[in-house]
Image (spheres, rainbow, N blue to C red):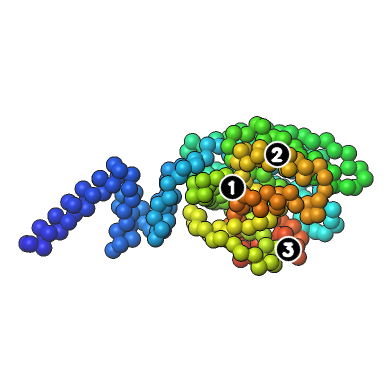
């Protein structure tokens, strides 16, 4: 009888404590069952609240001081050019438009997943096209509009009859930075040969909120774990995101997420990168990373579909074929 009374008393105190924690905005974990009684979730479920707090088991809570208000996805497309300044074939050896369509498919699915986690986040696609087939552009815009995302389309005309597709590449890069004036907060600059996991954008935005809150500054976030960044033994800081780890890096290609504030801060340097060809092409961006923090995901959140032997391409420890087929 005494045992029953003690159990009832314990349950009463537990319920009372849970109510208090809910009112105060605190989370609890039941060590015996690994459950979060306040949010009614198990330990393997996300208990973070986007825009409010990031919770990691064992580390506790990080209050989100830098809330993301909107995301512009600025996608540069060209369904005709295979590899810039190269004659090599891409992994899977398909025509270029196939990579563009699968990139679009993956971004739409990832944006839909992000919308579920951030109910009030405004997501917009800005498509910058250089010399694509008109029918391809119409199909791409139709896909995005069908998914109920706001879309803007910019056509950049470049005379590249001499075969120098670097001219069209630089023109689209310049236009992408000019489009920042149409943005409000976060911007994801992405090229049309990156196929994303469904959770890619959500993981990136969650990481952006958490890390920028920790460092009290704007940052850069990548979607790809580039193999070439493992060739040098540079020191990296390792951080824990929502479901993956992140490491600090000093280099990347031209697919990255940052804020309008950061782009405006380095606007002249970014525009210069799209005006004068450097070696490496991203030299100006790397110089910015020397002053600002940039983080790369472990494991990757997207695959860069370049040649199979390229150090700039296929991320390690990733089921490339599965991701390719899922976005057909």
Q: Residue 98's spot in the image, x, y percent?
A: 73, 50
Q: Residue 247's spot in the image, x, y percent?
A: 58, 59
Q: Earlier in the sequence, mark 3 or mark 1?
A: 1
Which is more foreground, mark 3 or mark 2?
A: 2
Label 1 neighbour load within 10 Å: few <14, some 14-19, many 20+: some
Query: Can you identify the residue that label 3 sits on?
Result: 311
Label 2: which secondary element: helix
Give me the residue at 83% from left, 35% from top.
157
Q: Residue 117's spot in the image, x, y percent?
A: 48, 44
User: On residue 267, which mark appears?
Assistant: 2
Query: Can you identify the residue that label 1 sits on?
Result: 219
The CA distance from mark 2 to mark 1 is 15 Å
Q: Earlier in the sequence, mark 3 or mark 2?
A: 2
| Residue reaching furthest to the right | 162
Q: Nearer the viewer, residue 243 or 178?
A: 178
User: On residue 283, which mark appears?
Assistant: none
Q: Nearer the viewer, residue 84 or 186?
A: 186
């Amino acid at each position: 009888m005494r045992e029953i009374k003690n159990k009832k008393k314990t349950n009463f105190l537990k319920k009372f404590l849970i109510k208090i924690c809910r009112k105060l905005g605190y989370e609890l974990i039941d060590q015996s069952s690994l459950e979060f009684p306040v949010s009614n979730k198990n330990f393997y479920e996300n208990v973070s609240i986007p825009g409010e707090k990031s919770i990691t088991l064992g580390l506790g809570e990080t209050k989100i001081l830098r809330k993301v208000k909107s995301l512009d996805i600025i996608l540069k497309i060209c369904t005709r050019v295979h590899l810039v300044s190269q004659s090599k074939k891409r992994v899977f050896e398909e025509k270029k438009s196939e990579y563009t369509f699968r990139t679009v498919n993956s971004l739409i699915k990832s944006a839909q997943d992000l919308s579920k986690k951030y109910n009030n986040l405004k997501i917009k696609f800005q498509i910058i096209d250089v010399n694509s087939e008109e029918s391809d552009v119409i199909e791409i815009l139709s896909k995005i509009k069908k998914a109920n995302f706001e879309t803007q389309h910019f056509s950049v005309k470049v005379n590249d009859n001499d075969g120098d597709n670097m001219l069209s590449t630089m023109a689209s890069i310049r236009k992408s930075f000019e489009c920042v004036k149409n943005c409000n907060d976060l911007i994801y600059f992405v090229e049309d040969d990156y196929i994303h996991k469904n959770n890619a954008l959500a993981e990136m935005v969650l990481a952006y909120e958490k890390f920028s809150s920790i460092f009290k500054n704007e940052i850069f976030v990548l979607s790809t774990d580039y193999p070439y960044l493992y060739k040098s033994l540079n020191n990296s800081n390792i951080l824990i995101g929502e479901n993956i780890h992140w490491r600090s890096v000093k280099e990347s290609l031209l697919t990255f997420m940052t804020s309008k504030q950061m782009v405006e801060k380095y606007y002249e340097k970014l525009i210069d990168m799209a005006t004068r060809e450097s070696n490496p092409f991203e030299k100006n961006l790397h110089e910015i990373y020397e002053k600002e923090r940039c983080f790369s995901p472990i494991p990757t959140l997207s695959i860069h579909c370049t040649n199979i032997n390229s150090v700039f391409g296929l991320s390690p420890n990733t089921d490339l074929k599965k991701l390719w087929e899922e976005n057909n």
